[in-house]
Image: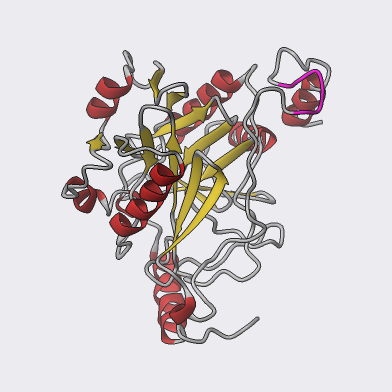
Amino acid sequence: MKRSLLLLMFLSFLPAAHGQFANPDGGDLERGVLPAKWTTGGPKCMEIPEWQVHEYNPDFFILRQSGCTDAEMPFLYLIFGSDRGLLWDTGSRNGNLAPALQHVVHDWLERNHRQSIPVIVTHSHSHSDHTWGDAALQALHDPTMPIDFVAPTVEAASKYFGIASWPTGLGQTDLGGRVLNIVPIPGHDKYAIALYDRKTGIVLTGDNLYPGRLYIPDFPTYQASTERLIAFLEGKPVAHILGNHIEQTSTPFLDFPIGSIYHPNEHVLELTFGTLLELEDGLKSMHGVPRRLATRDFTIWPLDSKDHGLGPAMEDTYKRTQAEQLKNRWDQPIK
């Protein structure tokens, strides 16, 4: 029997010690709702807004960039406390994030009878599909939402969040009655962090864990980060694990071709603590020799240590998929 299954069975006998509640009412966690499906990149791009905004609850918002603007289709997260908000990532190419962000913040202010609120802008990691909107937000001069920008670097994040020792230390920030814990998780990128929201029990894992291809250029560091995140979450309630992308279809073990702007029958965004344990189990099964491993909800995808590239086959797939779907972006074939 796999270690992850044994661990899950063991956890079921220890509700208090492992982030569960005495009764099935969610304890004091703030509830929220996730959509049954997300907007992707079609089938008709003329109908698709640049950003889909979803209200998980009145103080927690999820923004998704349209595939009609960029095939990466990243997810961003906007969380409010009583004193400030926090934006997780700034999107990919052609995102035009600033107007969408202003719309959400202004509506939140109006609903809460507020005149202004500072917004921390931070990042899951430093790759361009999560930092493209940085310059526009740094140039934004909106007195109702002054921007407190945290650069996507080890030095900047360590200083801002109080991480004394990278990557083994922990950090946090208080939005005002809402403490967010920060866990360094390098491996996909030299700079990468996870976020744990104590109010909702939501864990943000960036590109380290999501329903898709988990690209890993630094396998030992990634494995250590996975173990460290699991250790941090032990004893804490986890409602959802939310990453930055969806690349899986709703069919187990089947992903969308790289470069796809349209995702019919897409996998759900939310994963569980059990998924994180499955990732740990898959990494350990390799015994230090990285290899590709597909699971139901994600694929462990080590990258070549020399150039960290995806290789000629993936690059060819990307070009062919982009050519076909962009040609049909006004009216994608319904499959």
Q: Considering the image in quadrants, where does the N terminus appear?
A: top right
Q: Is residue 147 left or right of residue 16?
A: left
Image quarter for residue 11? top right
Q: Relative to residue 46, is residue 111 depicted above or below?
A: above
Residue at horizontal 52%, vertical 68%? 257
Residue at horizontal 41%, vertical 39%? 113
Q: Which residues are magenta?
A: 20-25
Q: Considering the image in quadrants, where does the C terminus appear?
A: bottom right
Q: Relative to residue 172, is residue 312 depicted above or below?
A: below
Residue at horizontal 33%, vertical 15%? 165
Q: Position of residue 273 (x, y in %)?
A: 65, 33
Magenta-drawn stretch contains 178: no
In front here: 335 or 298?
335
In front here: 97 or 295?
97
Magenta-drawn stretch contains 21: yes
Q: Is residue 229 left or right of residue 164?
A: right
Q: Given the current orientation, which residue lies at the most extreme front position?
A: 113
Q: Is residue 304 visible?
A: no
Instruction: Give the main secondary structure, helix, strand or loop, of the magenta stretch.
Output: loop
Q: Is residue 74 left or right of residue 138?
A: right
Q: Relative to residue 63, is residue 93 depicted above or below?
A: below
Residue at horizontal 29%, vertical 52%? 128
Image quarter for residue 158? top left
